[in-house]
Structures are given as structure tokens and as C-alpha cells.
Amino acid sequence: MLRRPGTQKDVELSVPPSALDIDDSRLVPGSDVDVRVRCESLSDGIVVDGHVEAFFRGDCRRCLTPLAGTVSIEVHELYQVTVTDPDAFPIENDQIDLAAMVRESVLLDLPDAPVCRPDCAGLCPVCGADRNTVNCGCSVSAPDPRWAGLDAIRDQLPE
Ligand SMILES: [Zn+2]
Ligand SMILES: [Zn+2]
């Protein structure tokens, strides 16, 4: 492709995570990672544009309900014969290795702390009831405003 700048090649693949060297319990077992990209050659590199999709599972971090979902990642990557762009991947032996790019994209995008829905009410801290389905009536004291900043930080951390 490098001999003829402007050449395009569409790549559509479904690959098992193990073939990408991904061993992550967040991926749904037995599901493939879908890769749909268009490669276009420049005089000194290849631009790869498209989508990567993977299926994940987990437990809602607030109510612990098992959940599953899809991460759909838009990719725009550059491969270079002589790497001058700090974000570019190398072209080695006239080959581009999509696996490393797909692996990085998937691992970056898999959720660490998924929620079953944005307004999930979570479990009651007093009795443990699922407040999405039960109004347990426990009196949960109002949070001390001095801790609000800490709570905001804690909300961003995986549990
Ligand atoms: Zn939930
Ligand atoms: Zn309760």
C-alpha cells in the first residue's frame, strides 16, 4: 500500500480476546472483539480509521446487579515507517500490527466501575435493601457537607 499513496483497504475482523493478548475478566467470555477499520496509505505511513467493539460484563458498583454492555470505540491511528509522531505505531517488515492498537483501545475503554443506569439509587447503607426496588424507609442521615469533596473523589474510584 505504501508504494501507492491513497490506496484504501477495509478490514473487518472478529477476533477472540486471547488472540489480541487480552486477558480481562471484564470481557464477556466467548465473545469476540469486532474490528472494522479502513486503512489508507500515505507516502510514509498508513492511517487507520474505524471502530472497535467489545462486550463487557460486570456488577453495578452501586446496587451490585450484574450488567452487560458494549464498548464502541472510535479509532484514528497512524502507523509510520519511521515513527516521528509520538502517538504513532511502527510499521515493521511492511506490516501494520492492528492487535496492539485494538488491545490498547479496548483496555482503555472497558469500564472500571460500571453503573446499571445513570440514576441507580444503589443499596441502602443501613439495611442493604436495593433502593431501586424497595423503599425501606431507613433514615439515612444527611451527608456532612464537609465530606462532599471526598465523596466526589470516592465516586470516581472503582470500588
Ligand atoms: Zn445499579
Ligand atoms: Zn434501608
Image (tube, rainbow, N blue to C red):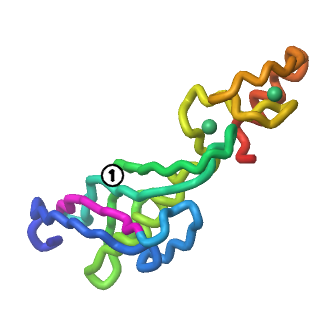
Q: For this view, does 42 lie left or right of residue 108?
A: left
- Residue at the far bottom: name it: 93
Question: Is residue 159 shown to the viewer in this render?
Answer: yes
Secondary-structure class at tag 1 = strand
Q: Residue drawn at (43%, 70%), measured in percent from left and top? A: 100
Question: Is residue 83 shown to the viewer in this render?
Answer: no
- Determine whether 130 is above or below 24 in the image: above
Quarter residue 33 falls in:
bottom left
Residue identifier under label 1: 76
Q: Residue 3: percent from the left, percent from the top? A: 12, 73
Q: Nearer the viewer, residue 102 or 70?
A: 70
Q: For this view, does 49 lie left or right of residue 119?
A: left
Q: Nearer the viewer, residue 110 or 11?
A: 110
Main SS, magenta residues: strand
Image quadrant occupied by the N terminus: bottom left
Q: Is residue 37 magenta?
A: yes
Q: Residue 154: percent from the left, percent from the top? A: 78, 36
Q: For this view, does 92 lie left or right of residue 44?
A: right
